[in-house]
Image (tube, helix red, strand yellow):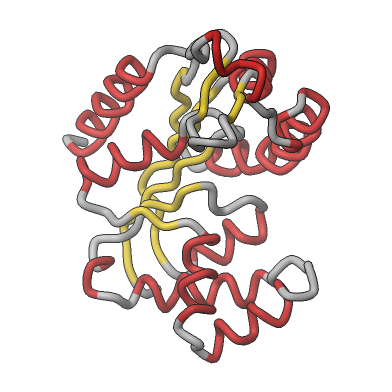
């Protein structure tokens, strides 16, 4: 085992992981990492493992777990990871979770729980202004009346696409939730409130767990 103790954050697309991972990283001092970030960095650095990953990515194939775990091992060896990392959206499968256990002990798994209908509302309601790049929401952040006609909806933000992504997430995550629940380290947080409410809940949980 290279390092410990790490924290895992997962939740469905649109649950607010990006916002909350920043909070957790600030509170715990554990650097936030995602497999996407590590892959891009490895490819950019022209490292050996990055070259292996790129050969799969260029073909539109999933990067094998063996390469992902090697990237994580390298990341855990860096000085700022001596007290573990905050994994954002990883692992996604039981084999990945079991492989991660060999590299770092996991002290806590924070699962943001948001109902599918709310996720669909959050994502499918997004609209982008092609001229400014500003993102609006038909319900939560309506655009000014005079620019609404030019707003666009991303192809992957349609309701059908979002529900397909959610279906995949649930298939992958249900076994993972049980895996970590059986270990007694899964903490489910209601992610349906506003950002401040969710952040307060997570902060209280982390402080409570750090005190044992």
In the picture, measured across the screen, residue 104 lies left or right of residue 126, that is: left
Instruction: Name the residue located 62 percent from the left edge and 43 percent from the top edge.
Output: 176
Q: Is residue 96 above or below residue 63?
A: above
Q: Residue furthest bottom?
A: 48
Instruction: Identify which residue, 61 or 11, lies in the foreground.
Output: 61
In the picture, measured across the screen, residue 209 lies left or right of residue 152, that is: left
Q: Residue 131, how many percent across, how many down? A: 54, 36
Instruction: Name the residue located 70 percent from the left edge and 72 percent from the top edge.
Output: 57
Instruction: Identify which residue, 183 or 125, lies in the foreground.
Output: 125
In the picture, measured across the screen, residue 108 lies left or right of residue 69, that is: left
Q: Residue furthest front?
A: 146
Q: Residue 36, how many percent across, how many down? A: 54, 60
Quadrant of residue 98 within the rendered picture: bottom right
Query: Where's the C terminus, which quadrant?
Result: top left
Instruction: Name the residue located 52 percent from the left edge and 22 percent from the top edge.
Output: 136
Instruction: Name the residue located 47 percent from the left edge and 26 percent from the top edge.
Output: 188
Query: Where's the N terminus, which quadrant?
Result: bottom left
Q: Residue furthest left?
A: 211
Quadrant of residue 151 within the rendered picture: top right
Q: Is residue 10 above or below residue 148?
A: below
In the picture, measured across the screen, residue 138 lies left or right of residue 3, that is: right
Q: Residue 82, how many percent across, how many down? A: 24, 68
Q: Residue 181, how many percent across, how many down? A: 53, 36
């Amino acid at each position: 085992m290279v390092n410990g103790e790490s924290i895992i954050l997962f939740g469905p697309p649109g649950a607010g992981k990006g916002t909350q991972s920043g909070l957790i990283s600030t509170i715990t001092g554990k650097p936030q990492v995602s497999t996407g970030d590590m892959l891009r960095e490895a490819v950019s650095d022209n490292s050996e493992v990055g070259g292996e990953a790129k050969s799969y990515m260029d073909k539109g194939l999933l990067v094998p777990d063996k390469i992902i775990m090697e990237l994580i091992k390298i990341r855990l060896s860096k000085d700022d990871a001596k007290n573990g990392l905050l994994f954002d959206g990883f692992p996604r499968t039981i084999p990945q979770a079991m492989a991660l256990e060999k590299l770092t002990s996991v002290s806590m798994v924070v699962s943001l729980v948001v109902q599918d209908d709310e996720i669909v509302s959050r994502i499918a309601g997004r609209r982008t202004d092609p001229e400014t790049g500003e993102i609006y929401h038909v319900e939560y952040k309506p655009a000014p009346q005079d620019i609404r006609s030019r707003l666009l909806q991303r192809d992957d933000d349609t309701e059908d696409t979002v529900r397909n992504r959610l279906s995949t997430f649930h298939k992958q995550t249900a076994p993972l939730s049980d895996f970590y629940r059986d270990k007694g380290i899964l903490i489910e947080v209601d992610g349906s409130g506003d950002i401040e409410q969710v952040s307060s809940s997570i902060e209280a949980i982390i402080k409570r767990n750090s005190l044992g």
